[in-house]
Image (tube, helix red, strand yellow):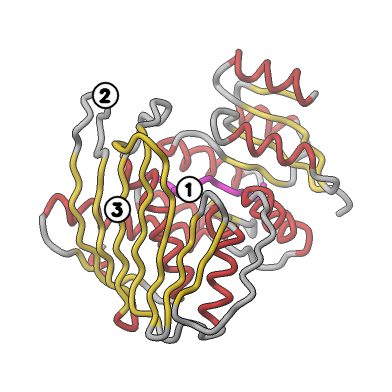
């Protein structure tokens, strides 16, 4: 396979970035895009000189496509992904993988049965500062991991209308914790609430997660803070790693000197490159459908905990 023929479904806030990145990749042929908004579709078609479809199934039927990015609102993930799988397309679906666990499980099974790739877009795993933190942890630089504390806050994004802050934001750091710890989540306790009248769902959440090996993750997310902050601090028995997602910077405290030089990259480009490498070579994807399912379980456990006002075991979902 010389060039991977790709398409993007949903060219709004996140989808337009997929289109932009794909259009600049040498081993990619951006064949088509699809969106229900004719105005948005026409602008994208004109800018990138690609075919445009209001109906994505018509795109699958008439275009020669190897792989597709699905960037539609969460509530439509299941239907779009299942259609792509039916037509034998490899799929990268933006996080969260689906709106419900049943939908996610059905998507994962369908991809396996069809023999196509299903990857989930947890882009923060490709942040170079997180990659560096992963290397330092695996090198035992800060000893045994004890806990992690993350903060992901900022103003309310009016474009998000179908989910709350937990699925939109908390899922990022819960997945990153799982990735860094390499331990499964066991139990979740969370409080959530809605303060903003314009927000139909929860606009703030505080989540405590018990992972394997007695590691604790603590997370604060909200759409209330007038500025963006994206950070995580990992505490070990021999030191602390502090990461700023936005600056792509990292500091290590209490440990011997380390080379903390980080080459700044665009995480989305790294994510799409990884996905396409799997499409071309057949190698396992770095973030699978099962990973997406795992992240969704953690965030749905948090939502359930906030309703019950008690801890929820992941095994009970």
Task: Decide if residue 27 is on the left or right side of residue 270.
Answer: right
Kindly report the distance in space between the C-alpha atoms of the residues bearing marks 2 and 3. 21 Å
Can you give x and y, in whole percent of width and height, for residue 274 in the image?
69, 58
**Depth check: 255 or 173 in front?**
255
Q: Who's the residue at 84% across and 48% down the image?
A: 27
From the image, tell me which residue sits under label 3. Answer: 220
Can you give x and y, in whole percent of width and height, for residue 134 in the image?
54, 72
Can you give x and y, in whole percent of width and height, for residue 120 in the image?
54, 53
Mark found first going from the N terminus, 2 or 3 = 2
Secondary structure under badge 3? strand
**Depth check: 81 or 8 in front?**
8
Kindly report the distance in space between the C-alpha atoms of the residues bearing marks 2 and 1. 23 Å
**Depth check: 299 or 193 in front?**
193
Q: Residue furthest right?
A: 2
Can you give x and y, in whole percent of width and height, for residue 305 in the image?
18, 56
Task: Decide if residue 266 is on the left or right side of residue 300.
Answer: right
Q: Which numbered marker is on residue 95?
A: 1
* Crowding near the residue tagged with mark 3, few <14, some 14–19, many ≥20 C-alpha atoms within 10 Å: many
């Amino acid at each position: 396979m010389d060039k991977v023929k790709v398409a993007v479904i949903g060219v709004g806030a996140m989808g337009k970035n997929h289109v932009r990145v794909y259009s600049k990749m040498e081993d990619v042929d951006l064949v088509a895009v699809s969106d229900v908004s004719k105005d948005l579709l026409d602008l994208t078609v004109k800018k990138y000189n690609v075919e445009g479809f209001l109906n994505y199934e018509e795109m699958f039927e008439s275009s020669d496509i190897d792989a597709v990015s699905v960037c539609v609102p969460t509530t439509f993930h299941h239907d779009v992904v299942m259609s792509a799988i039916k037509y034998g397309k490899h799929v990268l679906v933006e996080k969260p993988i689906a709106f419900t666990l049943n939908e996610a499980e059905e998507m994962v099974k369908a991809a396996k049965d069809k023999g196509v790739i299903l990857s989930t877009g947890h882009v923060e795993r490709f942040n170079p500062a997180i990659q560096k933190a992963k290397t330092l942890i695996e090198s035992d630089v800060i000893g045994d991991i004890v806990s992690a504390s993350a903060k992901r806050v900022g103003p309310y994004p009016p474009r998000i209308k179908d989910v709350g802050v937990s699925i939109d934001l908390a899922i990022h750091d819960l997945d990153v914790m799982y990735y860094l710890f390499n331990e499964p989540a066991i139990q979740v306790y969370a409080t959530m609430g809605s303060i903003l009248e314009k927000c139909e769902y929860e606009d703030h959440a505080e989540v405590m997660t018990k992972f394997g090996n007695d590691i604790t993750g603590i997370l604060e997310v909200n759409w209330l803070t007038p500025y963006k902050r994206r950070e995580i601090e990992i505490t070990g028995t021999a030191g602390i790693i502090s990461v700023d997602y936005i600056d792509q910077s990292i500091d290590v405290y209490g440990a011997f000197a380390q080379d903390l030089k980080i080459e700044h990259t665009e995480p989305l480009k790294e994510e799409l490159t990884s996905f396409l490498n799997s499409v071309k070579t057949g190698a396992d994807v770095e973030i699978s459908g099962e990973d997406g399912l795992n992240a969704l379980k953690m965030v749905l456990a948090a939502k359930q905990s906030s309703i019950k006002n008690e801890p929820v075991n992941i095994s009970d979902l």
